Image (cartoon, rainbow, N blue to C red):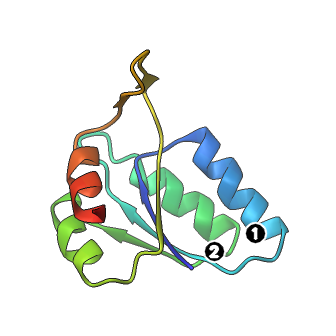
Amino acid sequence: MNILVHSYSSVVIEVLRSTKERGIRVQVIVTESQPYATGQLVKDFCEKEQIPCKLVLDASVGLVMSQGEIDCVFVGAEAVLENGGIVNRVGTLTIALCAK
């Protein structure tokens, strides 16, 4: 399973950890998540846990998703709004539009 991860999230990290513990084989593709480069934190975690991981530029996420190799997307949430909206890092909307 190929998972696209956008930005760092402790919840996403725990899901990846649980996936590894259950023996589910995944490959993670993580965006840089500029300007804070939090994608590197996800990559560092994956390397420590021996989960295959590739870091990609934020601007290339549309290309990565259009290649049809992504099975699911994990994003964190800075905030979840009353109306169900999610506030997250720049680039999350692009990912949502490409996933349709």
**Residue, disc 2:** 51
Cβ atoms under marks 2 and 1 closer than 8 Å:
yes
Q: Circle 1: is it few (<14), some (14-19), or many (20+) Cα within 10 Å?
A: some
Could you tell me residue 58's position as x and y percent?
22, 58
Q: Quick one: SS at disc 1?
A: helix
Assign a secondary structure to mark 2: loop
| Amino acid, disc 1 | Lys
Which of disc 1 and disc 2 is earlier in sequence? 1
Look at label 2 and name its amino acid: Ile
Indicate which disc residue 10 carries: none
Q: How far is disc 2 from disc 1 in space, using C-alphas? A: 8 Å
Q: Quick one: quadrant of the C terminus? A: bottom left
**In this rendering, position of residue 71 left or right of residue 34:** right
**Residue displayed at 33% across by 83% down:** 68
Placement of 97 over or under 82, stated as above or below: below
Mark 2 or 1, closer to the camera: 1
Q: Position of residue 90 (x, y in %)?
A: 23, 40
Is 85 left, or right, of 14 in this rendering? left
Determine the image quadrant of residue 30. Answer: bottom left
Q: Which residue is mark 1?
A: 20
